Image (tube, grey):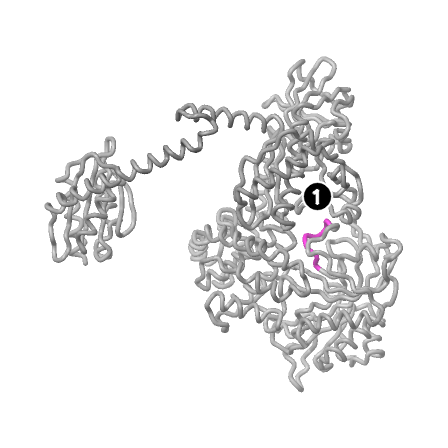
Amino acid sequence: MNSAELREAFLRFFEERGHTRVDSAPLVPKRDPTILFNVAGMVQFKPLWAGLVEPLPYTRAVSVQKCLRLEDLDVVGSDATHDTFFEMLGNFSFGDYQKEEAIRWAWEFIIQVMKLPAERLWVSVHETDEEAASIWRDVVGVPKERVVYLGDEHNFWEPAGGRGACGPCSEIFWDLKWEKGNCGPGPGEDDSEARYTEIWNLVFPQFDQQEDGSRPLLKYRGVDTGAGLERMVLAAQDVETVFHTDLFYPLMQAAADTLKVKISPETWEFLAITADHVRAATFVIAEGVRPSNTKQGYVIRRVLRRAIGALYLLGIQESLLYKLSGHVIEQMRHVYPELEERREQVALMIKGEEERFLKTLEAGMRLFADAAAAGKISGEDAFKLHDTHGFPIDLTKWLAKHKGIEVDLEGFEKAMEGQRKKSRKKMDITGGVTLKATDTYESSEFVGYNETEVKTKIVSMLYNEKSKEIHIQLEKSPFYAEAGGQIGDTGKIIGENFEIEVFNTDYNQAGVQVIHGKFVKGKPPKDLKGKKVKAIVDLTRRMEIERAHTATHLLHAALRAVLGEHVKQEGSLVEPGRLRFDFYHPSPMTAEEIAEVEKQVYAWIIANHEAKPDEMSREEAEKLGALAFFGEKYGEEVRVLQIRDKNTEELISAELCGGTHLDRTGDIGMFIITSETGVAAGIRRIEALTGQRAWKEIKNGREVISELAQLVGTERDKLVKRVEELKSTLSAETKAREQLARRYVESLAEGVLKNSQKIDDVEFVTGRVEGISRDELRLLADSLKSRRERIVGLLAAPDKNRLAVLCFSSKSTSKDYPAGEILKKVASRFKGGGGGSATLAEASIAETSLDDLTSTFLEIVKTRREGN
């Protein structure tokens, strides 16, 4: 049975028993902040067991869930059963059937559908769960000696993310090393040979674990089972490891072909790591995650860099992993069609990460080799590898394992904590001051969507004597705090006998809005807590910001309309009258595409459509098709900005956005794109101006054109033609000058050769030439090499108060007389420095005579000749 057949057979088996087939939830959970990735099939069903969804959409469900776990990353590739990305087969009951049906159906599927031999199977139950044990023995018929009782560590399922459904479980094991007559001791506390691998876990959720550790009973108790597809296929195909299955072996073979190596015991671990890690990266990146230094992005960076390190040990130091993502997509797209939609982006992201890490890998490997010479990688060296060379600790540990040495993980964590403390200090409010939680009653009420001037009071404050800055929290605040790419508001706060100029508004680490300012009237009082004030936003500045922000939404919509719906926001910055927008697109935009995008944005501005913000649930926003962006935090209630065509009501743009916006697109005024550049593999950046800043840019451009026209003696509308004429004239004159220079250089070459010295079959020349440039000095060297097959020379020309010196060596002499090495020695004698290749090198030295240069040059080449 192959993997595709087994996956479908599992779904069909439980559908026939009244289960609803449910699609896999995203690998990156949308509404579960307790985990970075889905780690089990039950995660998407947690609200159902807890009774948070009424009525239940179904009481029985079956799914195949995309999962990612890194707890056992250290052994992936070197053992039989661990991988990072896997598919979890699962059947679930919400207040419906209980243990007996779950156990009976699991055994029926394994024995009758998969046709596994019962003599190679074992089961375990929780040490207190006699009910499950009796079902296995008396109902299913498993011999009592094959039913093992284990404690909490093995047979109590903790909730994913620390909160939610949990309970005792029963596991089914496959004997990897079974031989007739040798059934072994069975799974237990000591399975040192890793003989028994769990292939199916039947969890019986009974409790709803809370943050404080308490466990009230679930509203709907039932069944949560999980069978890793990869291990089930291992058993079905009766192979040694998951990497021998049809899920991995074809990828390993593709990796071997791409890397031009053979699958062998020597390359097995390297190829297994490569196949597994590229598979994981492909699925994660396809969900919009970019390799980075935080959260999900750092997880995938760790995985990819571990694979790049493995390839380095195979002697491969070029980006090749990205080519394998296509093989993953070909294999899995029939099950997960979203992979095909992101094919190009996945490859570009992986390639970009490879290229970034390869830049520092060589230096990092040298540091690792030096550190390993001591017999143990110190915490300090492990931290330096991480901090300076981008080595995740997983990679350092794996490299150390291959050297047979250990890593001081405690020392590494100590160094990391030191760095985190420094980072936290830097993240404090200006001057090292931060509002304390004890000073803050609750988050400020933001009223700035509808009001820009309010009467309110100060609930917290800190005054920094050193910087003379004050940091305030208001009860009600009209100031928008920097978030979602939009910069914070400025303005003023006026109180009795004082006035504060607000220069920024942001959030501190606790997520509390903080207003930063300086006193412009009155003396700083010791405590303003409780004082009544008037808070006034700089409305002119706010309007310019709103022009840029609403234009950003139109730009995004225009990019998707012109380039395609693969375009996805990757970052943004919104300032007064200026925006920067990063987005996924595999190639630079053409001039025509940029013009088309600009034209479309302008059309929407001129049409003066309404820009309407609405509060709604996340679920409603998703149904609407509102765009949300990876990396942004959204609650269950979200703010969606909709822009619709005023004539047709057709949706132009809908995005989750907490920023401030104009009421109508026409208020943007002017819009111009000023640049389109690349910032990373597959990530493009557009910068644009709006409103007054766009007008000033156009005005300045017109003035420059007028000045240029005047400068070249023509009218504005004839400027391009005049410039082309001047360019053509300049080109002709440049060619004529180059021909004169070449003729002059040819005559110089003849003079230099008259003073050559021949030693054996090599001609050595020196020459000092007045009044020529470095470029012409290179032309002279080329001329001399073209005239003699075996020649080595040293040429000099005055360059300000020093000498420009060039050493050359023909291809046939460069091995015995490398120009770079000879010139370094010459330059060191005359207070100079430089370098180059074996055939051409350049330097700058102190002023000296040709005789001194010649004697030094000949001395050095004679020494090399004698050494050869």
Magenta segment boundaries in residue numbering? 33-39
Horizontal and vertical percent position of residue 81: 63, 69
Residue 569 seen from this side: yes
| Secondary structure beneath label 1 | loop
Q: For the point 58% across and 26% down, which residue is it?
A: 695
Q: What residue did someone put label 1 on?
A: 633
Residue 523, image x, y percentages: 66, 14
Quadrant of image for the N terminus: bottom right
Please state if 813 lies on the left or on the right of 419 as rendered.
Answer: left
Horizontal and vertical percent position of residue 442 = 77, 33
Q: Is residue 820 left or right of residue 548?
A: left
**Residue located at (49% from left, 64% from top):** 402
Q: Is residue 551 magenta?
A: no
Residue 840's x, y, as percent? 26, 48
- Taking depth in this image into account, of 623 and 21 the one nearest to the observer is 623
Q: Is 218 rendered above or below residue 238?
A: above
Residue 576 seen from this side: no
Q: Amino acid at mark 1?
A: Lys
Residues 141 and 852: in front is 852
Prevailing SS of the magenta stretch = loop
Q: For this view, does 51 lie left or right of residue 514?
A: right
